[in-house]
Every structure is written in C-alpha cells, then in structure tokens.
Image (tube, rainbow, N blue to C red):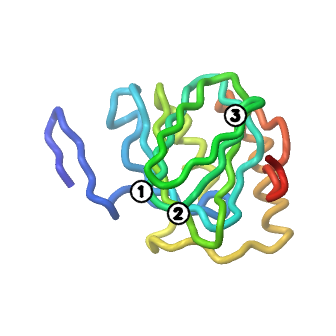
Amino acid sequence: MLTSSSIHGLVREEGQSFWFLGSLMILKASSETTKGVFSLIEQVAPAGFAPPLHVHHAEDEVFNVLEGDITFFVGAQTLYAPAGTYVYLPRDIPHSFRVEGATAARLLQWTYPAGVEQFFVDLGVPTQELILPPPASPEMVQKAIQSLLERAPTYHIEIVGPPPSADHH
C-alpha cells in the first residue's frame, strides 16, 4: 500500500473486502481517505447479478466496466456496456444494472461525494477471501432485502423496484 500524509494507493487485491447482495466488493477509497470527495469500490458480480432499482439522492455514481458485459437501466434508457465502457449515473434518477452472459463482471464504482460506501460496508459480510460468496438460501436473500429496505433511507437511497429481469430491456 502507498501511503503518506497526502497520497493513498492500493494494488488490485488490497482494500477492505466484503460480500454484498451476492457480489464481492473491495473498498479502495473512502470518505476517510479522500476527505469526503469520492469513494471507489471494485466489484465482482456473478452472471445474472442485478441490484434492485434504486435512486441515490446524495451522490452521483460512475461505473467503469473492466471485465464482462453489463446492461444499465437508467430512467427510461437502457445502455449495453461491454468491458471498457464508462457509465455516469446522476443522482435522483432511478437506475440498476444486470450482468449479462455466463461469466462474472468486474467493475469500478466511484461515488461523488463519498459516504454511501459505508452503506455497502454496513450491510456487507466481511471476507478475507477474494471470491464470490456462495449462493444464498431464499431465507437469506429475504433477510438481506429486508435489511436493504430498512437501512437505505439512512444513506439517502430509495429502493423503487425489483432488480431488472433477464427479459427486461
């Protein structure tokens, strides 16, 4: 890890790691390390992964798809995003995404300003293994969704719909 009083850097596998809704997240930069300017999370999401349709009211998000294929749903727009694609998601617009194909996707997620990363940490399950979590039982999925619904408002996030299905375009 690179450190000094003014710089902060982590190599690919460094950072606080945790499982969140069936994906692996690695926190690279937080409110603490950027003085609140932005956060950065590296995420590995399995094929078919899709978070619920939601709205961030306190931050904008930027995604960079590093590996895999993702479809983003932003307001009334749909954007197919293969590896190498950059996507900007402004606050106050409902959005979600879905990992397409049969392989996992790896992406970087920036939020401006920082703060929402703590939501993912709070609801996540700490892990030292940089692998996808095992499949969750229906009961575990329901419990995770309930926690998500309860905690989201604390972070100015509004859950407005289910995850997009594979036939949603």
Left or right relative to 72: residue 88: left
Q: Residue at x 21, y 55 (%)?
A: 1
Give the percent coordinates (x, y) of residue 104: 57, 67
Q: Residue at x 32, y 37 (%)?
A: 33
Residue 56 bears which disc, if any? none
- Three-letter amino acid code at the position of disc 1: Gln
Left or right relative to 102: residue 161: right
Q: Nearer the viewer, mark 1 or mark 3?
A: 3
Viewer-proximal residue, 96 or 2?
Answer: 96
Residue 126 bears which disc, if any? 2
Q: In this picture, is 86 found above or below 58?
A: below
The residue where tag 3 is placed is 74
Callout 2 secondary element: strand
Residue 16 bears which disc, if any? 1
Q: In this picture, is 40 found above or below 111?
A: below
Instruction: Estimate the spatial distance between the alpha carbons at disc 1 and disc 2, rounded to whole Å.
Output: 8 Å
Instruction: Estimate the spatial distance between the alpha carbons at disc 2 and disc 3, rounded to whole Å.
Output: 30 Å
Going from the N terminus, do you reach mark 1 or mark 3 first?
Answer: 1
Mark 1: few/some/many CA within 10 Å (<14, 14-19, 20+): some
- Three-letter amino acid code at the position of disc 3: Val
Tag 1–tag 2 contact (CB < 8 Å):
yes
Q: In this picture, is 117 found above or below 56?
A: below
Q: In this picture, is 33 found above or below 44?
A: above
Callout 1 secondary element: strand
- Three-letter amino acid code at the position of disc 2: Pro
Callout 3 secondary element: strand
Viewer-proximal residue, 125 or 48?
Answer: 48
Give the percent coordinates (x, y) of residue 32: 37, 35
Viewer-proximal residue, 99 or 51?
Answer: 99
